[in-house]
Amino acid sequence: MNFEHTEDRRMLADSLNRFIAEQYAFETRDRIAKSAQGFSTEIWQQFAELGVIGALFREEDGGFGGGGFDLAVVFEALGRGLVVEPLLGAVMVGDAIAAAGSEAQKETLAEIIGGGTIAALAHDEPGTHYELAHVQTRADRSGDRWLLNGAKAVVPQGEQADLFLVSARSSGAPDDEAGISLFLVPAKTKGVYVRGAPAIDGGRVAEVVLDGVTLPADALLGAEGQGHAVLERAVGRGVLALCAESLGAMEAAKTATLEYLRTRKQFGTLIGSFQALQHRMAELLLEIEQARSAVINAAAAIDDTDRATRERALSAAKASIGRIGALVAEESIQMHGGIGMTWELPLAHYAKRLVMIDHQLGDEDHHLQRFIAFGRQAR
C-alpha cells in the first residue's frame, strides 16, 4: 500500500492547516465554541470558498475528492484546530443523498458543498446505545404523504441546520434493520421543534422533536424500508472522519506536551530529562502511530464493496481511537501537572474533545463488539 498522499491532498492539507493556524487560533476558536450559535458562519463560508467542503465529495457529486484519504486529510487538520463548524453533518447527509437520492434531491448537494445549506443527521434516539438499527421514530403513510412522530437526541449543530436527514421506522420491530426509511426534512417544516444546548467539548447540540410532521412523497430518500444500508455507509464515513479528527487532536496534544517537557524546569532541571517521563512519552508516541495506522486502514477500506471488510476496518479504527484518545488525554494532562486542567490552556480542551469523540457514533466497547461480530460473519 502506498502511504504517500497525492500532490493535491498535500496541497489541501497545507492550505487548510495554514488557514486554521492563521484564522482559527485557540482564542478565536474558544469564543466561537462558546457563542450562542455554536460555530462561525463566516468561517463556514470560508471553508466552502477554500474547497474544504468540496474535498469531502466525489467529482460526480459536485466535489473534487470524496475518497477515504480526502476525508482523513481534512478532518485531521480540523482536529488539530478543534474546529466546531458542521462538516461532519455535511459528510454524512451528503453521502446519503449522493447514494440514494433522486435527481431532484441531489440538487441539494451543490448547496451543501457551497456552504448555503447546513445539513445535520438526526438519527440517534434516547436509549439506543449506538445501535444503528434501533429506531422508534415512526413514519406512517397518510394518503400520498408521510407523517413522522418521534424524537432525536444530541444532533450536532441542530439549531442552525437548514436540513435534517431523519431516520424513521415505516415497518418492523424497533431493532430490525429492515423497515427503516430515511427522509429529508427542512428545519422549518411545521411540527419540527428544536431545543439546543451547549456541548461539553464546545459548539452546540440539539434535541429534535417531530410532532405530526407531514411530508410529501418526494421527501423519502431511497426506497421505503431500505434505509439501513444507506445509513450504515453514511455513518461509516462519519466514523472515519471522527477517527481522523481524533488523530489530529492527539498530534496537537502530543506537540504541546513535548514542548512542555522541553521547557518546564523542576528544581533547576528540565523535566523532559526525567527517565520516567521519557518512557511515558515514548509509549504515547507509539500509541499515536498505532492510531494513525488504524485511520489509514479505515480510509483504505471505506469504499470496499464487501460489507464485513469495510465495517470491520471502521470499527477497529473507532475502538482503537477511543482507547488511545483517552490515554493521550490522561497522559498529556498528567505530564503537564495541574496547569493541564486550566481552562486557559488549550490542552484541557483537546483532552475533552478526545474523550467525547469516543462517544460519537459508537464508543470503544460498542465498536469492539461490532468488530468481533463482523469477524464471525467473515469466517
Image (spheres, rainbow, N blue to C red):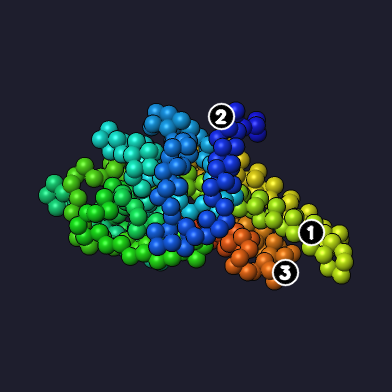
Packing grade of label 2 (10 A; few <14, some 14-19, many >=20) is: few
Which residue type carries mark 1? Answer: Thr
Mark 2 → mark 3, Cα distance in angstroms:
41 Å
Q: Quadrant of residue 256?
A: bottom right
Which residue type carries mark 2? Answer: Asp
Answer above or below: position of 56 versus 215.
above
* Position in image of residue 273 (x %, y %): 86, 59
* Position in image of residue 232 (x %, y %): 42, 46
Residue 8, disc = 2
Give me the residue at 38% from left, 38% from top.
114
Secondary structure under tag 1 reads helix
Q: Quadrant of residue 347?
A: bottom right
* Front position in the image: 206 or 363: 206
The residue that label 1 is drawn on is 263
* Front position in the image: 70 or 266: 266
The residue that label 3 is drawn on is 337
* Position in image of residue 296 (x %, y %): 61, 40
Packing grade of label 3 (10 A; few <14, some 14-19, many >=20) is: few
